[in-house]
Amino acid sequence: MSMKATLRQIDSVTVVDMSGRITLGEGCTTLRELIREQLGKGKKHLLLNLADVTYIDSSGIGELVSGFTTVSNQGGQLKLLNLTKKVHDLLQITKLYTVFDVHDDEAKAIGAFEKSAGA
């Protein structure tokens, strides 16, 4: 099964509910296109909800980092929400956990955008 994504808008934050697998090929392409599409619409506050992501490989992790960099370079923010234990462990092992702003509470995560955006 490949990755699926559903978008919700809460204030200035686009919440992306992701499910399935983020792996080399289709999953990574879907994620990359989704981020580019949102930036193209001027939506620069992205919250990726990974609660239903069943598997992520090194290419998927690379795509998260690439997305994070792309959004940051456009003056936006990309945050992660509800990491599964597998994804959390993978980010810890690869020393990327500290790169991302990771949350386990959606309301607090959305509030963090407002604070860091200086709004």
Image (spheres, rainbow, N blue to C red):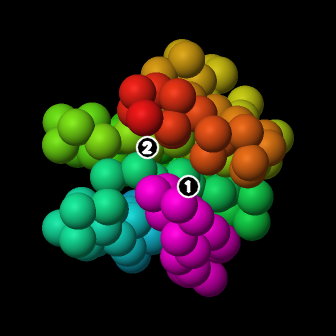
Locate residue 74 relative to residue 17 in the image: left or right: left
Tell me the element at label 2.
strand
* The label number, if any, that marks residue 19 in the structure image: none
Q: Quadrant of the C terminus?
A: top left
Q: Is residue 32 visible?
A: no
Residue depicted at 62% across the width and 69% down the height:
17
- Region of the chain picked out in magenta, as a range: 1-22
Residue depicted at 23% across the width and 71% down the height:
41
Say whether residue 32 is magenta: no
Residue depicted at 40% across the width and 27% down the height:
118
Which residue position holds label 2? Answer: 78
* The label number, if any, that marks residue 48 in the structure image: 1
Tell me the element at label 1.
strand
Q: Which sits in the foreground, 88 or 6?
A: 6
Q: Are marks 1 and 2 in contact (CB under 8 Å)?
A: yes
Say whether residue 5 is magenta: yes
Can you give x and y, in whole percent of width and height, for residue 111 in the image? Answer: 63, 39
Q: Amino acid at mark 1?
A: Leu
